[in-house]
């Protein structure tokens, strides 16, 4: 049995018998005005964060969500879209698609604005999406890509890039791990399916996105997720896993490489009211400016004593140098 078959079986069982502890969601279940999330959707929220952000969802976007779970994030996306087939949900597990259909009927009884027809559920594979090229404003996946091994991950990201419109965005939440994992952990198909042993370092995760052609990357959140300890897992040392929320934007790739925002800022505190680096970046005196890592390195190379550059917070909330 391949690791993808194991994953299929794990989520088939999770569809038939909801497993509240399957993933450790790092976000509270938030509700918007007029939005009620059925309890069954909350119980089947098999993610490690959130991919639903209001600033991504203006002007009735067309949304793609891969790996539907119990339908909670599809419902949240529909809140912003509110059009027939405005949200496409893709899953390879028939039982999960059927469970979502039932959950949407329950959502209709609790939300007078919601209609099940807002969501177009499609049987499909993340490695071969049943979606046309350049047709999606916002694509999303939650705690799915970390399951894939290297070549499948490359293909899954390429598929998301294919279906997005120019300047569209891929919004993700996935576990990450900065410590090395032994081969026993890496090759354990069930632990990979449970979103544990496939976790990559953040730098490798970002590189997979930029290699696919995404010109702008935003790391929006970094949070504690799980512990793999020697008493319960095949490891000699305690391994700490975090989750990150990331947006990869289908911007053209700059000639000097991608713009990757990891939560750095620059503060100019010199004698003039503004500092111009000659490359399109204006730093107003004593006003923090969010900067990508590329701009941070360029400013640092000037070796000025009147510009402070913060360390990465791994929390970026928009705006800044690019």
Image (spheres, rainbow, N blue to C red):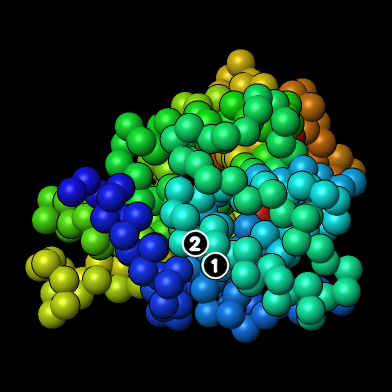
Q: Are marks 2 and 1 in contact (CB under 8 Å)?
A: yes
Left/right placement of residue 185 relative to residue 139 reads left
User: Alpha carbon of mark 2 to alpha carbon of mark 1: how far?
Assistant: 5 Å
Residue ID at (13%, 51%):
183
Q: Position of residue 267 (x, y in %)?
A: 72, 50
Residue ID at (32%, 32%):
151
Q: Position of residue 20 (x, y in %)?
A: 45, 80
Q: Residues within 10 Å of mark 2 (few under 14, many from 20)?
A: many
- In terms of image quadrants, where is residue 179? bottom left
Disc 2 target residue: 96
Tag shown at residue 282:
none
Q: Residues within 10 Å of mark 1 (few under 14, many from 20)?
A: many
Q: Position of residue 158 (x, y in %)?
A: 50, 29
Disc 1 target residue: 99
Left/right placement of residue 41 relative to residue 290 reads left
Residue ID at (48%, 32%):
128
Q: Position of residue 41 (x, y in %)?
A: 60, 75
Local secondary structure at mark 1: helix
Split into 4 quadrants, where in the image is the C terminus?
A: top right
In-front residue for pair 273/78? 78
Residue 165 makes an appearance in the image: yes
**Position of 10 relative to 187 (above/below):** below
């Amino acid at each position: 049995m391949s690791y993808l078959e194991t994953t299929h079986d794990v989520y088939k069982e999770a569809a038939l018998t909801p497993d509240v502890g399957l993933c450790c969601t790092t976000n509270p279940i938030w509700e918007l005005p007029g939005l009620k999330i059925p309890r069954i959707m909350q119980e089947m929220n098999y993610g490690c964060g959130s991919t639903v952000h209001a600033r991504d969802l203006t002007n009735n976007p067309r949304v793609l969500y891969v790996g539907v779970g119990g339908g909670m994030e599809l419902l949240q996306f529909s809140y912003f879209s509110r059009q027939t087939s405005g949200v496409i949900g893709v899953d390879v597990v028939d039982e999960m698609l059927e469970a979502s259909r039932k959950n949407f009927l329950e959502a209709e009884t609790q939300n007078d604005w919601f209609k099940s027809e807002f969501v177009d559920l499609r049987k499909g594979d993340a490695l071969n999406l049943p979606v046309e090229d350049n047709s999606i404003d916002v694509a999303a996946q939650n705690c799915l890509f970390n399951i894939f091994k290297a070549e499948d991950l490359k293909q899954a990201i390429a598929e998301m890039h294919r279906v997005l419109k120019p300047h569209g965005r891929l919004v993700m939440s996935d576990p990450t791990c900065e410590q090395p994992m032994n081969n026993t952990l890496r090759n354990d198909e069930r632990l990979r399916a449970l979103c544990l042993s496939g976790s990559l370092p953040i730098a490798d995760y970002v590189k997979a996105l930029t290699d696919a052609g995404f010109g702008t990357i935003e790391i929006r959140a970094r949070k504690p997720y799980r512990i793999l300890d020697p008493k319960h897992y095949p490891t000699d040392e305690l391994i700490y896993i975090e989750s990150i929320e990331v947006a990869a934007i289908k911007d053209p790739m700059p000639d000097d490489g991608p713009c990757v925002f990891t939560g750095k800022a620059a503060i100019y505190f010199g004698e003039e009211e503004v500092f111009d680096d000659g490359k399109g970046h204006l730093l107003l005196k004593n006003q923090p400016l969010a900067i990508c890592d590329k701009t941070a390195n360029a400013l640092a190379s000037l070796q000025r004593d009147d510009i402070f550059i913060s360390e990465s917070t791994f929390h970026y909330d928009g705006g800044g140098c690019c």
